[in-house]
Image (cartoon, grey):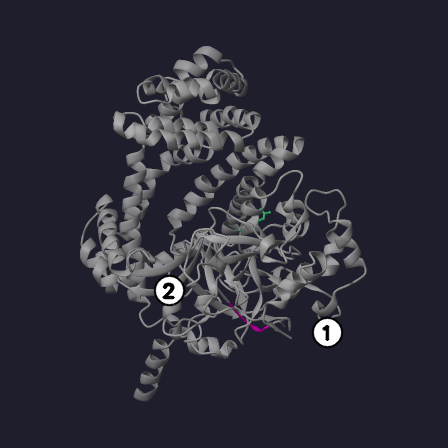
Amino acid sequence: MKKILVLLVAVAFFLPAKADKGMWIPMLIGQNYEQMQKLGWKGTADDIYNVNKSSLKDAIVHFGGGCTGEMISKKGLLMTNHHCGYGNISSLSTVENNYLMNGFVANTQEEELPCPGLKVKFLVRMEDVTNRVQKVIGDAYGDEVGKRLGEISKKLKEENSDNGKYKVTVRSFYSGNKYYMFVHEEYTDVRLVAAPPESLGKFGGDTDNWMWPRHTCDFSMFRVYSDNNNRPAKYSTNNRPYQPKHHLPVSLKGVENGDFAMVMGYPGRTNRYLTSYGIDLSINDYNPSIVNIRDKRLAIMRERMQADPAVDLKYASTYASVANYWKYFIGQTEQLKKLKIYDQKKEEEAEFDRWSKRNARYLKNLFPDYAAAYADFKPYIKHAIYLGEAVGSPKMTQLAMRIGRMKGMDAEKLKKALPGLKAARKSMIVSMDLEMDRKLFGAMNHMFYRDVPRAQHPSIFATEVFKKYGSENWEKTFEDYANAIYANTALLDDAAFDRMATATNFDKLLQDPLVSYAMNVRNNYDDNYAQILKDYRHERFELDRAFQGGLLEKNKGQLMSPDANSTMRVTYGSVKAYQPKDAVSFAHYSTADGLLEKYKPGDSEFDLQPKIVDLLKARDFGDYADKKIDNLVTCFITNNDITGGNSGSPVINGDGEWIGAAFDGNWEAMSGDIAFDKRFKRTIVVDARYIMWVLDKVLGGRPLLDEMTIRN
Ligand code: ARG
């Protein structure tokens, strides 16, 4: 009897992590090793993360701050998603020379295109700094927490940056229960090497986005450059390709259902420990507000983009990212409801309550306190969202708010700030479509007026807008206001602006109608409501820290994955088919047949260039075809746990080879950032062979393949 008991305890202690769920910390991946091995990982834990020899982590980069990329040759060749390179590809394009539309390939280094502003970061090492950070934070509350975290981060930076050689960041895990320091090396000379035509790179557009089955060839390629010592350097023709400590071999062997699959990358944010109160807020307030506003923004953008190819190119990247999270929040709301996540959270909270009554009585008020924090904040959430998402979206308003924030600066400071303001205005004017911006201004202010509680409105709506332009037709009222304000503002008049943008005349600039409007709207929020949001955030931090601290205690001996926070993570599992609903089965892969099935000539999302259609019809798949099915596999799915930021991440097989690039999640699991449902949650991957086929046959980039380490 006793023996069995001991055994049970032992088993409970080594309870394996669930294979699928979890974005694991690379430094601690040894804890998951046994499980990984069972699933098919043939390497060691050291092969994944090691600071004394090269390991997989050396092939992974944080790409541009919001995506992931990986090294696929010893000459700094970088693979990521098309939608990650999108902003750079569109900036490099013109209506006459449209790389976004036609694709791009550089078969020699001279043909590569520099991407000013693009940065990639390699992880040198990470370290648990919990003790030092928590000692400094102590029992601080509110703003003081951030201040003290800033102080200790500064100190850690000084100690670890090696005189500025490295970027050092400290990040909170489990909401302040753990802190890790990250030392990165940042490279700033990054050049575009290849991109498919958008018809393939964004095939299916917003219709197919966040959905399986998928046929998008969502990749783009860059090259990282360094100085002669392999160290970061500003762009220079003297730089040479960076030599990574590790690069991933490319496997053309393909995958089977059940094969091991691992993803390493930089997931941005998850909210897996969100309470039922947060779910309620998401479903009823937060998500619908964002979706409503974006519906309108997208319609206004679309109208102007369709009318003018130059506007289309200017706004392509903004449109794609607004649309991406517009659909994301539609899907998240739908699945939160369908999967009954609110009820699920209530049950989990009841169970936690039962546990804390016995083991952690100091937590007995946790959920009532959550309820109170949310209740205090809820009446103002629309105001906060509409300020940022709606009223704050026209570029002219952003400029006016920036000017408003400079009020009260002394002459000395102003003199320093003015050149930056002027430069920002110049580049904004070039990148803006005036008609779109004006329409946006009218429509967004109208929405604010209509949807945000009247008692919270800025005074200018009554004293100016309705006094001068008021009518029963609110939409028209705000249109008239927009027309007048854009006609009268000096911010659009180079000469008038330059006259006022001086230290002596700055007061006049503050009286500009657009600037007064922006200041009125901004001050109304800052003076009356900003503190409420701040209080809520501070409460949330305290409560989340207590809750997750309690969970760590409750789950002692089990692995518990922290929420994503834009730091490097590892997730492992398998290639896996699924059943989206009753009587429907999805295969684990898609093929080129689907491209032709979906192909719709002339359509903005499903068109393909004649050359591509010809290649597909001729079934000219070369060495990239899957021998077993005699077809080109386009995409496949795994049960890996990823989120935004993982885009472009390498999907790695049991032998440490690259089998594709992760690029999306699936519709049935759109609630996955909040609650992971293993039945449905999938990662959508572009198959390595599809990418290589496009690179070789569509783009003519054979020399690039030759520099990779190809495994057949
Ligand atoms: N859903 C993808 C992601 O967040 C981005 C896809 C971009 N494509 C688009 N049609 N907006 O990773």
94 and 437: which one is in front? Answer: 94
From what the image shows, is residue 257 above or below residue 287? Answer: below
Q: Residue at x 41, y 63 (%)?
A: 229
- Residue 473 is labelled as none
Q: How many marks?
A: 2
Mark 1 packing: few (<14 Cα in 10 Å), some, or many (20+)?
few
Image side of residue 689 versus residue 509, left or right: right
One can see residue 455 in this view: no
Q: Could you tell me which secondary element the residue under label 1 belongs to?
A: loop
Residue 248 image point, x, y percent: 53, 69
Q: Amino acid at mark 1?
A: Lys
44 and 538: which one is in front? Answer: 44
Image side of residue 556 versus residue 705, left or right: left
Image side of residue 104 versus residue 181, left or right: right
Q: Which residues are magenta?
A: 258-262
Mark 2 packing: few (<14 Cα in 10 Å), some, or many (20+)?
some
One can see residue 458 in this view: yes
- Judging by the rendered image, the residue that carries numbered circle 2 is 124
- Judging by the rendered image, the residue that carries numbered circle 1 is 628
The tag earlier along the polypeptide, 1 or 2, is: 2
Q: Amino acid at mark 2?
A: Val
Q: Could you tell me which secondary element the residue under label 2 belongs to?
A: strand
Q: Which secondary structure dominates the residues rendered in magenta?
A: strand
Residue 242 image point, x, y percent: 48, 62
Residue 58 image point, x, y percent: 44, 67
Q: Residue at x 45, y 29 (%)?
A: 425
